[in-house]
Amino acid sequence: MSAGRQAPRLPLGWAVLVAVMASLPLFVVKYPPIQDLPFHLAAMRVIHSYGDPAFGFQNDLVLRLGSTQYVLYYLLGSLLAYGLGIVKANLVLMCAYTGGSVLAMRALLRALGRDERLCIAVVPLLYNVMFLFGLLPFLVGIPVMLWGIAVAVRYFEAPSVGRGVLLAFLATSLFYLHVFPFALFGLAFAVMFPWRRPKGWFVAGLPTLPALAVAAWWTWLTPEGRLAQGALTHPEVPSKLSPLGKILDAYNWFGDVYRDLSDEAILGTLGGVVLLSAVLASRRLAGESQGAPRPGLWRYAAVPGACFVLMLVTGEQHGHIWLIWQRFPLLLLLTVIPLARMPGGRAGTAITASLVVLAAVSTVTACVHWVRFERDDVGDFDEALRAMEPRSRVAGLVFDKVSSVVHRHPLVHFVSYYQLERGGVVEYTFAGYPHWPFTFRPDRAPPEGAPARLNWEWTPERVTSEELYPYFDYVLTRGDGFAPTSGTYHLSWQGHRWNVWQRDAR
């Protein structure tokens, strides 16, 4: 570090406690309000138990692990499941996002010569709209990205075999988690590269060669990669909003999680604390504690800057790739934290205490809302699952999609919990889409003979009896709207929230 007072550090033990606190909501309920979580759990189950006759996957499905760019998420989950089971294995991966983001931010702050206490500001940002949507491989990629940038900074300063191997591992792993964090890591690596030391270029760039090789192969030689090339440059569904409109709408895609105003209060308070911290630091009321930042800090600023620009210029959707520009407000807020300022002395202690209290409040708020969701919205779902025989084919039609607790539609993919627990085939599923790790056997696909149309699950009123009968053994419904043709399905179980319809005998 340049001459000057050393930035305050947050002891590892305290950082671990903050990381554990940030992960507590993951353990309070069985069914969190995460929209795509059932998808990911079902995919993990198919991969892990493909050869197990108790689930019957080999009858209808074929593994295709090379088709998904974020296959590492499922492979890690399957590996952990040998000792933990699928659900607990996935909890570990989600903790890698929640707790891992805190610890990775601390590592990045230390590498950049910043006040490590700022990593506490990550916690109120974790339970966001992207998490509510369940973009889990993308989210797990965020702490890996932050950690990778930190290791790159250290490696450029003092190359070593150990740091080089770790950097190569993180870069390659990040590619197989999600391409968006991987691209931002690549940008950070490029702008912080020691360009002024040409003799060290080969050593500095060597750890990235494996990641660059697999990225080039995937981008240019696979259908999924060729599809992704157009996501940023010419999306099929461009945004209807102007750049100013996106700025005004950004909160809806980041912080608008709960139906009450608790998230607005938490994030508004966080903004106030960060602003106050900057004011106190600039006035040096207690002495500037940041010390002299490392020279690469302002080159690192290109990362949040790129997030801001990409938020303004990218579109909505490209094929199955959706929520493109909407991911960048979260990435912007997380990556800008190292640029924030903290005062020293008592003022810095007070700001730190405020961040800890706010982190605790945000964690308790998530726990309270998740418990309410499971009690009021999920209801008797377990009984509905038990009403269907294992290894069956089940279609889910969720007419009543609205949650009384959170925004968005966390119930729409709940039918995939059947595949997780009882095997068989479900619809709606991504099976057969180019980015999914398994597909249907050619002679065992649903009636269309191909994957269901995009948005199938969002329009249950458009699903006809011909799309269901006689292929599906059961139809799981939530809300009114299913009126099967006579001789196709009958109501076999009725609950308060969910109903099970069984196929009539043929």
Image (cartoon, rainbow, N blue to C red):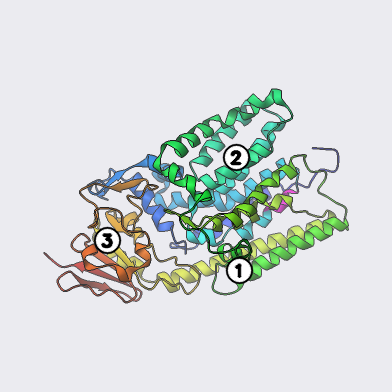
Kindly identify the amino acid type of the residue bearing the numbered disc 1: Asp
Q: Earlier in the sequence, mark 2 or mark 1?
A: 2
User: Residue at coordinates 74% horizontally, 43% vertically from top-left?
Assistant: 297
* Residue 186: mark: 2
Kindly identify the amino acid type of the residue bearing the numbered disc 2: Gly
Q: Is residue 406 visible?
A: yes
* Residue 443: mark: none
Q: For mark 1, what is the residue?
A: 263
Q: Is residue 278 above or below residue 85?
A: below
Position of residue 308 measured from the top left corner of the image (x, y, whole percent): 64, 54
- Mark 1 crowdedness (10 Å alpha carbons): few <14, some 14-19, many ≥20: many
Magenta-tinted stretch: 115-119
Position of residue 162 measured from the top left corner of the image (x, y, whole percent): 61, 29
User: Residue at coordinates 69% horizontally, 63% vertically from top-left?
Assistant: 357
Kindly identify the amino acid type of the residue bearing the numbered disc 3: Val
Q: Extreme left residue here?
A: 506
Q: For mark 3, what is the residue?
A: 394
Q: Secondary structure at mark 3?
A: strand
Q: Quadrant of residue 221?
A: top left
- Mark 2 crowdedness (10 Å alpha carbons): few <14, some 14-19, many ≥20: some
Position of residue 455 measured from the top left corner of the image (x, y, whole percent): 38, 62
Q: Main secondary structure of the magenta part?
A: helix
Q: Quadrant of residue 3?
A: top right
Position of residue 438 measured from the top left corner of the image (x, y, whole percent): 33, 46
Q: Is residue 486 left or right of residue 494?
A: left
Q: Quadrant of residue 351?
A: bottom right
Q: Is residue 454 left or right of residue 362?
A: left
Q: Secondary structure at mark 1?
A: helix
Which callout, 2 or 1, points to the residue nearer the camera?
2
